[in-house]
Amino acid sequence: MSEQHDHHSAPRNPYLEKRRTGEETIKLEQRAAAIEELLISKGLVTQEALDRLVEIYEHDLGPMNGAKAVARAWVDEDYKRRLLDNATDAMRELGFGGMQGEHMVAVENTPNVHNVVVCTLCSCYPWPVLGLPPGWYKDPPYRSRIVIEPRSVLREFGLDLDEHVEIRVWDSSAEMRYVVLPERPAGTETFHEAELAALVSRDAMIGVTHVTV
Amino acid sequence: MNGIHDLGGLTCFGPVEREVDEPKFHEEWERRVFALTLASLGGGLGPVDAFRHAVERMDPVQYLKTSYYEHWLEALETRVADRDLVAAAVGDEPLTPDVVNAVIAQGVDPIRDTESFAPRFAVGDAVRAKNRNPSGHTRLPRYARGRRGKIAMIHGNHVYPDTYAHDQGENAQPLYSVKFSARELWGEEAPGHDHLFIDLWESYLEPVTT
């Protein structure tokens, strides 16, 4: 178990300080076990179904899905048009959809427009194409600040946008899920679709970075 | 409910901190809480709106002091109490591994198609987010209340969280993407060409007549 606590050793913003004693962790384990026992005993779920759910979200779903759609859009103008017209259907063409991505919208970055996605009220995120969100997406600094001072937040991610660029922040306050179609980087003219997909990061599809070679 | 969860526009939390090589889950109990939440939202402790409201009902100090999956754990406990699950009868159709893939692939569709779907607003219409402060669940962020924007997209007829979270019916109604200028929301010092898009239900909006 010890390696699972290693992340606590990094210096943390005091508002993100989630250091726990071993005793507190044991209490959380007990509380989770109590819910698990109750739900199983009430015939709502089986142990094996819980294991399967974890397996899928820990290993099967992730940003490699969204990256495939982005790369396809970069090499196929018709697909790009379909993606921007109806991302739900276009993602479904590639086999991606369902839970927390029942309805998706793709927003396109251009030299003059930069899109970035947030959920200020909780942590809404397009699971089928990006997997589960990173911690920073769910924590207060990003959720609170990206709507009011996007330029300084993006600089913290190393993205210094020119003043002329229009920033569009998408607050996922309903059940629509947003994904950013980043700009294809220069110097990739000879890249194949799979090589392009390998360049596309999770953060670029949230809109906090550009795709770079 | 005007709660601590409604974070948009606060600037007091310091820099965004990213964990290098962050795992999906840090501890085993987080895996369990994640799976239990997914399983139970379709099986008696839902809908998701009620689960979100259970997180919103947390003590605000605890909300800030505890980790993400602790929020979910407490919300699960709250929903167990809400539904009096301990006293409930045992069901005979548990979620089993053979159907998990299909359940995830299907998701939970929030859209209700009705023949009478007739959005009050059209793309381009000027609207104002109402200044409303309900005591229960809402998805109208405080930072948008009273602010003027324009309809950017019409997303269809969506289940209304303000009632659905409280067992008061789906009351599906048009959902819009509303485009606000950064200046309208944050004042004159905001860059004039930046915008925010917020998904808002028709009940949150009123027409702007000038």
Image (cartoon, coloured by chain):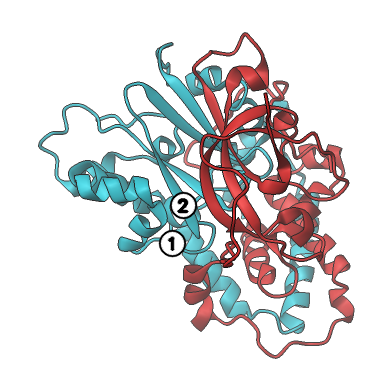
Chain colours: A cyan, B red
Residue positioned 63% across, 25% down in the render: A145
Q: Is residue A176 visible?
A: yes
Chain name for mark 2: A
Q: Is residue B24 visible?
A: no
Q: Position of residue B12 (x, y in %)?
A: 73, 21
Residue positioned 72% across, 33% down in the render: B7
Q: Nearer the viewer, residue B86 or B138?
A: B138
Disc 1 marks which residue? A97
Inspect the image, locate mark 1, and give the three-letter code of the amino acid beneath it: Gly
Q: How far apart are the two marked residues, 2 and 1, measured between alpha carbons? A: 9 Å
Q: Nearer the viewer, residue A23 or A85?
A: A85
Residue positioned 34% across, 35% down in the render: A182
Judged by depth in the image, the label closer to the viewer, 2 or 1, is 2
Q: Quadrant of the C terminus of chain B?
A: top right
Tell me the number on the disc at residue A104: 2
Left or right of B50? Residue A94 is left
User: What secondary structure is found at the residue carrying circle 2?
Assistant: strand
Earlier sequence position, callout 2 versus callout 1: 1
Residue that protrudes farthest toward the bottom in the picture: B92
Inspect the image, locate mark 2, and give the three-letter code of the amino acid beneath it: Met
**Residue B59 picture quarter:** top right
Left or right of B91? Residue A97 is left
* Callouts 2 and 1 close, C-beta under 8 Å: yes
